[in-house]
Amino acid sequence: MKKNEKQTDLARRKRKHRERRSGTNVSIGWDRLDNTAHLFPVIAGEDMTNVYRIFVCLNETVEKDILQQALQIVLPKFDGFNVRLRQGVFWYYFEENGKPAPMVRAENTYPCRYIVQNRNRSYLFRVSCYKKRINLEVFHALTDGMGGINFLKELTYQYLRLAHPKLKEVVGDRLSADTSLNREDSFLKNYRKSHAKGYKTQKAYLLKGEKVRKGEFGVLHGMMSVKELKEAAHRYGVSINEYLVGAFVYSIYMECLHGITSARPIRAAVPVNLRPFFQSVTTKNFFVMVSAEFLPQKEAYSFSETLQITSKSLRSQINREHLENLFSYNVSNQKNLIASAVPLFLKNIAIRYVYTKAALANTTTVTNIGNISVEDAYAPYIDRFGAFLAMSKGQPLKGTICSYGDKLTFTFSSVLADTSIQRRFFRKLSEDGIAVRIESNGVYYE
């Protein structure tokens, strides 16, 4: 038996005999994509990679070789990451990979690049490191941000146990009790029969302007205190998420529309994690998009007015009934027997058309990964977490929120050369008494 065959067989036997946590048994050989995941292989390419990054910053320099060892140990325990993408006659599907883990790289290029499977041992994710930072980049067909955090935390725990053997004596060598291996399709489990379409299709105000050089990707991190954010948001009567989304929308309004009226709304797509609403612990995608909408019908809206409009827009949509209607419409289309019998290449044409209409209905996207917690034993080694998104059609600037303890990081990812929106955003936060420390990946040198 060849070396690779031995490794594959060993991985299979380990998965067959290990205990499943909070999950249902899934066929080892192959697995279906969830409802949302069907979109990403169709639209992905070099210019729209559908790759997101989640990262953790440690309080020590990351050793690449130890991180490689950690990945080799952790990967076989996660069926959802140990796959490659296959194309069938009617649908894409996942097939067990079984190859050695992808190589951990020292980061030396721009983030969120397209993942070419045959250059990555057929895996749909990559791991890299830079100084004290561990980066996990994931093709969105695999999982959403919560699924990515689930994997990154275990990879980080394993790394720290290898780097600090005494830590292993304290915590053992096991998966965390909070780590899910569940692979159910929670869309299918929770959907109700057909609903009217709930997504916006009216074209939104779109950001335009000179772009950075081809291949470049600008990243700006703003680090701030959760406590200070709470105090500022409380003064306006909104949540932290509503406050940050509203500040982003207001910054676009002031810098691009210059405080005047517009026939098209500024609309920020906001992904909502559905797990808390439907008692799910799946590691597949399980989210829907709602929109924070602001249509300037008069001149010179104040920040407070803009914030109240956008927060009201969000609150009206984030309830179980509306969220259920949104994804049930999508699942009903997927379950349509006539559509299922249509060859994949024809499905792809329809999916691209529907996606383009939906994409141009939003000015930007702001996603909130939430507050990440870790086991107490690992906390002294971890400084902060962060995340950001790749670009998509019509959206050259996006925002991502991620917090750990009292440290919240708001990250802008962009291919626009101008940073006036980002500057306006951070300046507004400073005016509200929030101290912000800014870092860049070097594209903007700010």
Image: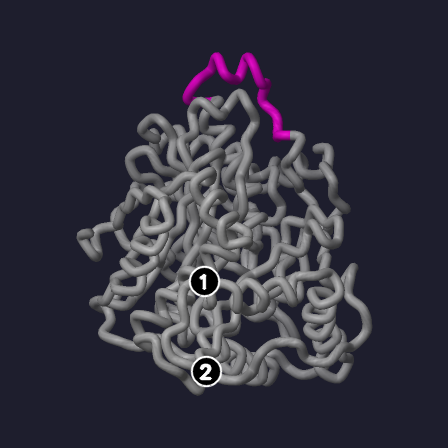
Farthest residue to the left: give it: 445
Residue 151, position in %: x, y?
A: 54, 41
Q: Is residue 436 left or right of residue 234?
A: left
Q: How dense is the environment of label 2, judged by Cα within 10 Å: few (below 14), some, or many (20 and up)?
A: few
Q: Using the image as rendered, state which of residue 400 and residue 134 is in the foreground.
A: 400
Q: How dense is the environment of label 1, judged by Cα within 10 Å: few (below 14), some, or many (20 and up)?
A: few
Magenta stretch prevailing secondary structure: helix
Using the numbered discs, state the Cα–Cα distance from disc 1 to disc 2 in whole angstroms.
16 Å
Examine the image and state in which quarter residue 51 appears: bottom left
| Mark 1 vs 2, N-terminal side | 2
- Mark 2 — residue? 297
Residue 227, position in %: x, y?
A: 46, 38
The secondary element bearing badge 2 is classed as: loop
Q: Is residue 229 left or right of residue 79?
A: left
Q: Residue at x 61, y 76 (%)?
A: 199
Q: Amino acid at mark 1?
A: Ser
Q: Residue at x 54, y 31 (%)?
A: 374
- Mark 1 — residue? 304
State whether residue 5 appears in this view. no
- Please provide the residue range marked out in magenta: 162-176
Q: Residue at x 25, y 47 (%)?
A: 108
The secondary element bearing badge 1 is classed as: helix
Farthest residue to the bottom: give it: 263
Q: Is residue 159 left or right of residue 91?
A: left
State whether residue 225 appears in this view. yes
Indicate yes or no whether the magenta region holds residue 285: no
Residue 200, position in %: x, y?
A: 58, 78
Q: Amino acid at mark 2?
A: Gln
Image quadrant in which the N terminus is located: top right
Q: Which mark is residue 315?
A: none
Q: Residue at x 27, y 58 (%)?
A: 423
Residue 311, position in %: x, y?
A: 55, 63
